[in-house]
Amino acid sequence: MSDFTADAPVVPAETPSRRPPITVVGPVAWLRASLFSSWLSTAVTLALAYLIVRWAIGFIDWAFVNAIWWVPTNAQGTSQTQACRALQGSGACWAVITEKHRFILFGTYPYEEQWRPLLCILLFIGLYVVSAMRRFWRKELALVWVATLAVIGALMWGGFAGLPYVPQERWGGLVITLILSTFGIALAFPLAVLVALGRRSKMPAIKMLCVVYVELIRGVPLISLLFMASVMFPLFLPEGMNIDKLLRAQAAIILFAAAYLAEVIRGGLQALSRGQYEAADALGLSYWHKTGFIILPQALRLVIPPLVNTFIGMFKDTSLVLIIGIFDLLTAGKTAVVEPAWQGFGIEVYVFVGLIYFVFCFAMSRYSQGLERELNRHRVR
């Protein structure tokens, strides 16, 4: 027994696990490898860091420390603009935003009725939030869209239940941008799907019609389409018939966006392997069942980034309606500083308008990234 014990192998005690040094993994290792790998990289990093810090300090001083947010008129008659001009550019004059924010957001909509476009903006945002939640992706969501857009139209126009009628010429600001972009995306997307499918159709007439439409629309800038819709199209209408300017601009934006979206969707259809089509045919599915349940969902999943990129571009391109006299968000911002008392403070207005654009575009970008990761989770090995 003692010999057996003496000959038994000695099992070493379990050694505690040790973390790798911070110079190999972690933030310090990344900094050394990416920013301080050589003397040249270190010099460039320090120079850029110095410039960024200097710019950040200057921007904070201009935008916050020395800024004027609101200056009421005192007994001596000193106005907001006089107080802002006394800064001589050393600080931002955010008083122009507090003074003109209603015009920037709502245009020339009647002052006492501006709660209506404000409510419409909130309805738009709520519609976006609900549509972004996958648990609401049911057939009833289409009814929610129709009902919400109908309520928005009723609020903006009025003329019932004691609400005074407001013509579209008085609409403007952020609500116009949301109307043009939302209706444009909602109506251009299904049209784009049909055009993309038509370009891959085996029927020559349908395929040629879709090809001509896409190439014709993509071959001209959006400004030319807006000009045609505003100036040329009314010439072909019967005498006495007139279509509202906003509706014509909306139709031009829809046709323009649908052509670009159709090419994006067609790229997703071509990216699918032939086996998906053959498997659907083997199941005996009809063309529309095969397309709606198998082909199209996979194609759209593949092209989420370019689709959202087109949506973002379309949201910003609504500012081009300026050429036909529609006061969108950017045009309202430009007009707000035309008044002589506020001339010279355009930077503050453009920063405010740019921040609004950034919030909406950044939200679309981040949501698309999360949606892409969620829908393509099965592809991760």
Image: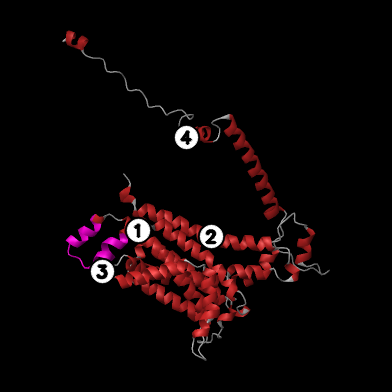
C-alpha separation, residue under disc 2 versus residue under disc 4: 32 Å
Q: In this figure, which residue is indicated by the disc labeled 1?
A: 268
Pointer 2 or 3: first along the chain: 3
Q: CA distance from mark 1 to mark 3?
A: 17 Å
Q: Secondary structure at mark 4?
A: loop
Q: What segment carries the magenta color?
A: 275-297
Nearest to the observer: residue 52 or residue 13: 52
Return the disc, 3 or 4, that comes first in the chain's sequence.
4
Query: Label 2 is placed on what type of residue?
Result: Val
Give the residue at x 21% y 61%: 280
Q: Nearer the viewer, mark 3 or mark 4?
A: 3
Distance between the alpha carbons at the discs numbered 1 and 2: 28 Å
Q: Would you place residue 192 above or below residue 152 in this image?
A: above
**Residue beneath label 2, please?**
359
Residue at point 64%, 62% (across, down) = 350
Question: Which residue in the structure is indicated by mark 3?
Answer: 288
The image quadrant where one finds the C terminus is top left
The colour scheme is secondary structure
